[in-house]
Image (cartoon, rainbow, N blue to C red):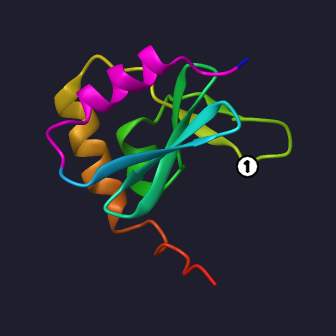
């Protein structure tokens, strides 16, 4: 099932206090970037983030879910209505994320 544009718009609005949040459509789903780094994505209208140490620390009881078959597990963000939490989550994760890969 593809994610809805409405859910993407909702998540982007929740992240609007951050500069340099962007997204890219990918096979009916959306990859979410913060300052050029992949933080997670929207899959089947679920906001999933990479399981960095800070993300796990901030969401110790988060469900680990697969965004799609064959993918690595990601953390389900349950508290998407809490704009302040989402802002703090992405800021905490940023330094732990790998640098964006250079395009050839």
Q: Position of residue 58 (x, y in %)?
A: 35, 40
Q: Is 24 or 63 nearer to us in this picture?
A: 24
Q: Is 61 or 83 nearer to us in this picture?
A: 83
Count all numbered tags in the image, as a single digit: 1
> Residue at left 53%, top 49%?
50
User: Is 30 left or right of 104, judged from the image as shown?
Assistant: left
Q: Which residue is mark 1?
A: 72
Look at the picture and state if 38 lies above or below 83.
below
The quadrant of the picture occupied by the C terminus is bottom right
> Residue at left 73%, top 17%?
1
Look at the picture and state if 10 lies above or below 90.
above
Q: Which residues are magenta?
A: 2-18
Task: Judge whether residue 99 is colored magenta.
Answer: no
Task: Judge whether residue 9 is colored magenta.
Answer: yes
Quarter where residue 88 is shown: top left
Q: Position of residue 61 (x, y in %)?
A: 50, 28
> Residue at left 36%, top 23%?
9
Q: Position of residue 87 (x, y in %)?
A: 22, 40
User: Is 13 left or right of 23, judged from the image as shown?
Assistant: left
Q: Is 84 or 4 nearer to us in this picture?
A: 4
Look at the picture and state if 34 lies above or below 74.
below
Quarter where residue 28 is shown: top right
Q: Is 62 or 8 nearer to us in this picture?
A: 8
Residue located farthest toward the right when viewing the structure as drawn: 70
Badge 1 marks a residue whose secondary structure is loop
> Residue at left 85%, top 45%?
70
Q: Residues within 10 Å of mark 1 (few under 14, many from 20)?
A: few
């Amino acid at each position: 099932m593809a994610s809805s544009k409405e859910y993407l718009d909702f998540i982007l609005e929740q992240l609007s206090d951050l500069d340099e949040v962007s997204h890219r459509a990918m096979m009916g789903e959306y990859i979410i970037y913060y300052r050029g780094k992949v933080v997670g994505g929207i899959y089947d209208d679920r906001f999933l983030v990479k399981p960095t140490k800070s993300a796990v620390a901030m969401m110790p009881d988060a469900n680990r879910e697969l965004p799609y078959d064959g993918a690595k597990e990601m953390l389900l963000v349950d508290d998407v209505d809490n704009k302040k939490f989402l802002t703090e989550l992405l800021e905490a994760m940023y330094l732990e994320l790998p640098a964006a890969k250079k395009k050839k």
